[in-house]
Amino acid sequence: MSLADSVARSGLAVYAEVALVIFFAVFAGIVLYTLARRHGARYERLRRLPLEDGRAQDPPPSAGGKS
């Protein structure tokens, strides 16, 4: 008797199918989120991040007179 036979007889195969469907739905959601046009500017900025020389692009915030 193999493991596949044991799982088939016990009725646990449905859990594997449900897990596969959930995994595929989450994977498809992540892919669609990544390819969405509304995130284009953010990803463009992140794409260039490794090429920067480490200097801050924005001026540092002022202390505002706090001591």
Image: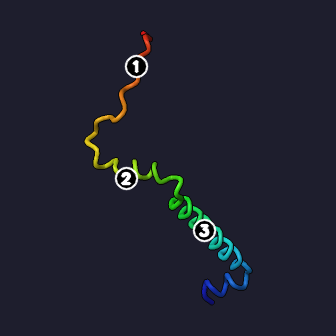
What residue is disc 2 on? Answer: 47
Q: Is residue 55 left or right of residue 46?
A: left
What residue lies at 28% left-to-right and 49% top-to-bottom? 51
What residue lies at 55% left-to-right and 59% top-to-bottom? 33
Residue ranking furthest to the left: 53
Location of residue 55 in the rendering, given as x and y in whole percent from the top left corner: 28, 36
Q: Amino acid at mark 2?
A: Arg
What residue is disc 1 on? Answer: 62
Q: Earlier in the sequence, mark 1 or mark 3?
A: 3
Location of residue 30 in the rendering, given as x and y in whole percent from the top left corner: 55, 61
Q: Earlier in the sequence, mark 3 or mark 2?
A: 3
35 or 26, which lies in front?
A: 35
Q: Which mark is residue 23?
A: 3
The image quadrant that residue 3 belongs to is: bottom right
| C-alpha span from label 1 to label 2 | 28 Å
What residue lies at 40% left-to-right and 48% top-to-bottom? 45
Q: Earlier in the sequence, mark 1 or mark 2?
A: 2
Classify mark 2: residues with Cα within 10 Å, few (<14), some (14-19) or many (20+): few
32 or 11, which lies in front?
A: 32
- Helix, strand or loop for disc 3: helix
The image quadrant that residue 52 belongs to is: top left
Color theme of the render? rainbow
- Helix, strand or loop for disc 2: helix
